[in-house]
Image (cartoon, grey):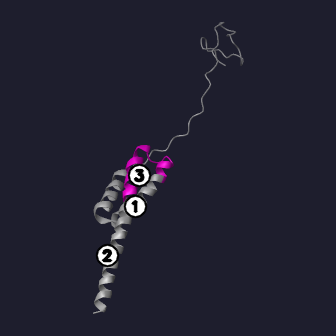
Amino acid sequence: MVCNNCNSQQPEGSKFCSNCGAAIEPAAATQPQQPARPALRQGRGGVILTLGILALVLTGPITGIPAWVMGHSDMKSINAGLIDQSERGLTTAGMVLGIIGTCLGALVLIGIFIVILVSLIGLSEM
């Protein structure tokens, strides 16, 4: 230990300096350093939401599947702490709209296929 007043070396555990008589302050306990937190990645919530809206309104599976896949990937990163929690709302909304748009688009395609099939069967009976 070192005296804060005269800088003389003192035995460990001393309360007063043997040279000048000043009170010796124990050294402040060092706190263990927190491990450095990795920098957060930028989320793609806005892009995912845009793709989800397009899937629902216009393009179906063409933009719905990418919204679904990108949303799932970003949600895993958000849960792991790699992307800021503020992206969760946009990402979730875009992913859900992508799922709904994909399902509706698939139903429309199945309906078109059935209509074409029924018309072909009707034409063959004539």
Residue 50 is tagged as: none
The Cα–Cα distance between marks 2 and 1, rounded to whole angstroms, is 20 Å
Q: In the structure shown, which secondary structural element does the residue marked by tag 3 occupy?
A: helix
Quarter of the image where one finds residue 39 = top left
Residue 116 at what x, y percent from top left? 31, 81
Range drawn in magenta: 76-97
Residue at image point 34% right, 54% down: 49
Image quadrant in which the N terminus is located: top right
Would residue 75 be counted in the magenta stretch? Answer: no
Residue at image point 61% right, 22% down: 28
Dot 1 amino acid type? Ile
Quarter of the image where one finds residue 102 = bottom left
Pair 3/2: label in front: 2
Residue 92 is tagged as: 3
Q: In the structure shown, which secondary structural element does the residue marked by tag 2 occupy?
A: helix
Q: Main secondary structure of the magenta part?
A: helix
Q: Pointer 2: what residue?
A: 112
Residue 20 at what x, y percent from top left? 65, 7
Whether residue 64 sits left or right of residue 82 in the image: it is: left
